[in-house]
Amino acid sequence: MTKKFTEKQIHILDVAEELIAKKGFEGTSVRDICSKAQINVAMISYYFGSKEKMMSYLYQYRVQRTREGFSEFSETIKEGRPEMQMKELIKFLIRQLFKYNYFHGFVTQELRHTEHLKDDLLAFYQLCVSKLEDVVKKGVTSGVFTNMPKAEDILTIILGSSLFVIRNKNFYELYVRDSEEAYFSNAERKVQENLLTTIFAVLGYNPQ
């Protein structure tokens, strides 16, 4: 079930996310968050319990927002050609994974004992599968796609490839030769190109 956040909680979470994106979880202190959010340090304990628990709430909030964004985005393009829809949905998912890359190591640990994160992720994954499945069916029906792979397998390819690159920077940076600051943007572009080629090949799409 979707958790309802108060305006104050959302303000704190937005500030925390901005700082963690820049400095990392370990490099961001509770005082940093409170100073920027202009709140008393005790408010973190009041609203979340601890910095670690706040991160769990932050991830849950981010998943909920991403799910809403994905649903809205898929609606805006639903009248487009199947190949366009598939391309844009793939790009949307990759963009979100790389944009919030700083979550993934933390979440791997938290999922072991936090049921609400599992539930939120499951709901998001099921939504993605539903939207991808609709596009695949439309593409096959119209003759644009000649194959009908399972939508859950398409999602697995997207998530697996993206998360591998995010979590294995020491390996993938050998093949993305650029500055430290540009690594994730260049890695994202490379992953996007590869996944679009791979998934459209699996779909049997042959642009004329």
Image: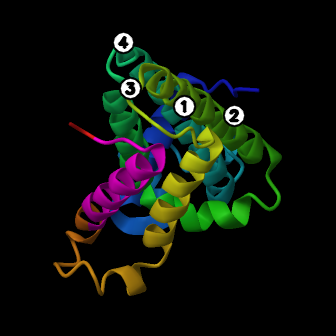
Q: Position of residue 16 (x, y in %)?
A: 46, 49
Q: Give the range drawn in magenta.
A: 187-206
Tell me, yes or no, if residue 139 can be seen here: yes
* Majority secondary structure of magenta residues: helix
The residue that disc 1 covers is 67
Q: Which of 48 and 111 is in front in this view?
A: 111
Whether label 4 touches label 1, CB < 8 Å: no
Residue visible at 30% across and 67% down in the picture: 187
Residue visible at 40% across and 79% down in the picture: 169
Q: How crowded is mark 1: few (under 14 residues within 10 Å), some or many (20 or more)?
A: some
Q: Is residue 15 above or below residue 32?
A: above
The residue that disc 4 covers is 79
Q: In this view, does 200 lie above or below 164?
A: above
Give the mark nearer the N terminus: 3 vs 2: 3
Q: Which of 37 and 108 is in front in this view?
A: 108
The residue that disc 2 covers is 123
Q: Where is residue 33 in the image (x, y as percent from the top left)?
A: 45, 52
Q: Residues within 10 Å of mark 2 (few under 14, many from 20)?
A: some
The residue that disc 3 covers is 82
Q: Which amino acid does label 4 sit on?
A: Glu
Residue 201 part of the magenta segment: yes
User: What SS does tag 2 mark?
Assistant: helix
Give the mark nearer the N terminus: 4 vs 1: 1
